[in-house]
Image (cartoon, coloured by chain):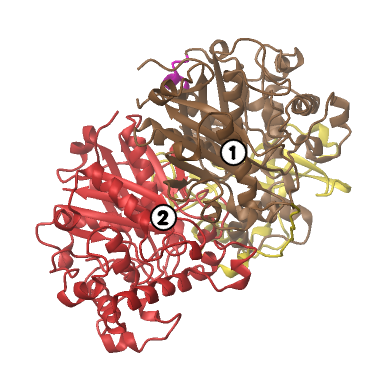
Chain colours: A brown, B yellow, C red
Amino acid sequence: MGRNVAIISVGYNGRFISKRPDINIPELIQPAVNNALGKTKLKPEHIDAYVVGNMHTFEGVNQPHLWASDHFNGSGKPVMRIATGGTTGASVYQAAYYHVASGMYDVVMAIGWEKQDEGDSQVGLMGILLPEAFSLFHFGPDTSSDRGIAGLGGGGSTGGAAFQAMSYLTRANAGIEHIDRVAALMRSNAAKNPYAHLQQPGCTEADIAGTPIISYPLRFGHTCPTSCGAIAMILVSEEKAKKFGLTDRVAWVKGLGSGTSDATTGNLIEGQITDPAEQQICKITAKKVYSMAGIKDPRKDIQVAEVYSGFSHQDLMWPERLGLFEEGMAPKILDKGGYAIDGELPINPSGGVTSTNAIGASAMVRVGEAALQVMGLAEGGHQVKRKIENAVAHGWGGLFQFVTITVLGKTPVKK
Amino acid sequence: MTQETRIIESTWDLTAYQFKIEADALSLFVKGLKDRKILGRKCGTCGTVYVPGPTYCRKCLIDIDQVVEVSQEGRLDAFTVSLADVRGKAVDNPFISCTVKLDGSDSFLMGVLEGWTDWRSVKEGMRVKVVWKDVTQGALADLSHFQLI
Amino acid sequence: MNERVAVVGYKQTKHTIDSPVARERMVYELVKSLYHDMGITKDDIDTFVLASNDFTDGRTISEVFTVPRIGAYMKDETKVEADGLNAALYAYMRILTGLYNTALVIGFSMAGSEFRVPLTQSYTMDPAYERPRGIINFYSTAALQAGAYMKKYKFTDEDLAQLTLKNIRNANNNPFAARKDPGASVEKILGSRPLYLPLREAHVSTYADGACAVVLSSKKTAKKFTDKPVWIDGVGHFMDTYYVGDRDLLAMEHLTAAAKKAYKMAGIKNPKKEIDLAEIHTNFASEEPVLTEALGLFKPGSGKDVVKSGASAITGTLPVNPSGGPLGANPVNATGLIRLAEASAQLRKEAGQNQIKGAKTAVVHAQDGPGAQLNTVFIVRR
């Protein structure tokens, strides 16, 4: 099943924030690359190949890795660009994994970034559906009021997320207060992560509940910020990890996978209707990934999770779909403190995506944070104290239909 | 060393594209709406009914051309209550957008839900029916909304 | 681990400058008929790798509505945002690990009718300096390169026209090519509209609506699909620096590096002798001598001799683009993958009127970025 691969370094450009008018895209990437290299003894010449990606329509530069190649030391090296929407960062990292696991390259750097102050994220996001929306206008929709438009597109700016949140709450028999509670936890976790964007130490449920509702049950406090940031990771083969004398503080890639469903409304598996909160593809992919990683019972064998939640209800939904909790149990476990950094199964000690979202980086940040937890190197007080044998990192993208999952661990899978 | 930074204006012009769109599904759908029917397509192999109905089955990856009419009643699935506009300003008349699975269809239709007084009493799984505009003309707007039964 | 990977199936659309169907339908029809030809179903495919670009598609996350069309529903899928040959490279790596045995690779775009290629190319340029100035772009970079080559090696406008004509004639006999010009002549090419001299309209590749799909398989499962596997024995890809002024547009050292890596993997010591044909990604006819020389197929500066001797013609000693190459059809994102399909057709003796006799080893090339900044090379064998 391929060569064993280890993540040996995770670097950030600095704290992710909403505006960086002082720099351009290549200048955003470069510090992350230097940071990742600086945590090792490696020099740029030790990197055999690069895999990079972002969502380039957001910034309006087509294939910006061409422009940035000198800034990440990619000129004169193999470079591959991957982009899969919200899952981009994780897809980039997975491609880097395959570069090493296949035996093609020994030392590979994966880089994900987004500079969301450049360009218009809303235009970028609208670009997903725009041609399809244009097509609807050929068929005479009711455009006389907001209601007509909402009937077509589904609930204004939060789109399908609000449907999903409602559906999740119904299924889990939970209330909006649970979403408030998990949102508050994420913001206070973020305050312990020096790279996080929205840091609110001691953020309470009441703070979140005070923000206006956009589309019930989602409030402003449940949505993610738009951040500027870059992440770089170095992946190496087992042989190289030994050669570099790096086998203690590394995170081994034990299992990984990416899955796709369909974006058109209504989802259907084997004759059974599924709703937006069902996320069958996440369950299917998780099963495959755990089997590859030798994880028999994810609830016992995994000690920390970094899930990709663009909206706070997803911090409840994803751990269930990943098999970490029984379905419908997440709100109860949250209430009992199980989610906290010192809890039974810490979810997003980093503060997650609702605290920090540089889209093309976000799914890789989940992997990077999981790696740092396994390595014991998470900074600023968000390191989980309990012994971590395995961590899971998750990403979603597209119109709720892409998923990426990775299991990292302290010891490699025996071949 | 000081660094000088300037902001430049630039746009990604989507109007520069001429998109070709597959129109089969919506063409059939609006044709049905004119006659106050909800039409879709059914896969002859797996039996899945798609509404609006594309000309292929995504499960079987085959062409499908069997046109079927589905019921005008169905089950309320997910929904969301619009209480504020994009800037967070409360709207005067909250409204509910919803997805509905009509009986005999395997797809969801999106629309606006009416027939409620307190949105807190609306629950997933409630029965709903299609309400038509007074005059139907073969447009998406013909389907006015869904009404709680 | 899988030790060897082969192309076991391939298919391209009949490329056109104005497709009658939308891209979703185009992709769906192509993949479905490939599966049909191979006698397989989508369930025989372990992993799917797409190549498209949000700018060329005019859509953010351009694969959102195309993945279900290729049979990837509820399957493992990812997307490379570069030419399709890079998607094949990624699929190749995925199979090597042994985690997957089969992969569908697909590249597509509507470069003929939905958008203007120079516009999406302009979005590639540094937005602060080169984009607003508009001087350096894909066309002018190619023209600078062509001018430098022609001056240094006494390669004349007539030589370039002759080279262009070779490709147009090959395209005339290629049923998939979009460009058909039976009356093409050196005079007509020399008289075509000047763009960035020495480049003229006739030298530019034909931007087209089209798609290409390839099925890769490990050695273990290849037999199940075909008795004519085309083995991928060498791969290489390298990036050059971005600023055109910093590059040596004639030496193309990074392409040479990519080729050397691929040749080494394939155990090829003398490409001039051991390679039977080349399918290369040229956006402009003038790139052909530069790229083939950097690939080590011809002596540096020998472009004039190659044209005069007909060495790169179908009947020559080392045919280049017997398919007509991108001059016949350039559906951006699919173009390099089409080179792999065309080379596979040659090695499997399925290339129809353009068939080269006894071809056993081919070099396949793809590029991205202005002036071929990123190059990818495959060595394939029958």
Side (left or right) of C374 relative to A323: left
Above or below — where is A329 with respect to A41? Answer: above
Q: Does the image show residue A100? A: yes
Q: Does the image show residue B37? A: no
Whole-angstrom CA distance, mark 1 to mark 2, is: 29 Å
Amino acid found under the numbered disc labelled 2: Asp
State yes or no: residue A294 in magenta: yes
Q: Which residue is drawn at 60% across and 10% down?
A: A387
Foreground: A272 or C254?
C254
Q: Looking at the rendering, in which quadrant would you find the C terminus of chain A?
A: top left
Residue A87 lies, in percent from the top left, at: 56, 39
Indicate the chain on which mark 2 is placed.
Answer: C
Residue A344 lies, in percent from the top left, at: 67, 11
Magenta-colored span: A290-295
Residue C317 image-quadrant placement: bottom left
The residue tagged 1 is A34
Outermost residue to the left: C358
Q: Nearer the viewer, mark 1 or mark 2?
A: 1
Above or below — where is A280 with respect to A132? Answer: above
Q: Residue C83 carries which label?
A: 2
State yes or no: residue C174 in magenta: no
Foreground: C239 or A335?
C239
Q: Which residue is drawn at 75% across and 48% down?
A: A19
Mark 2: which secondary structure? loop
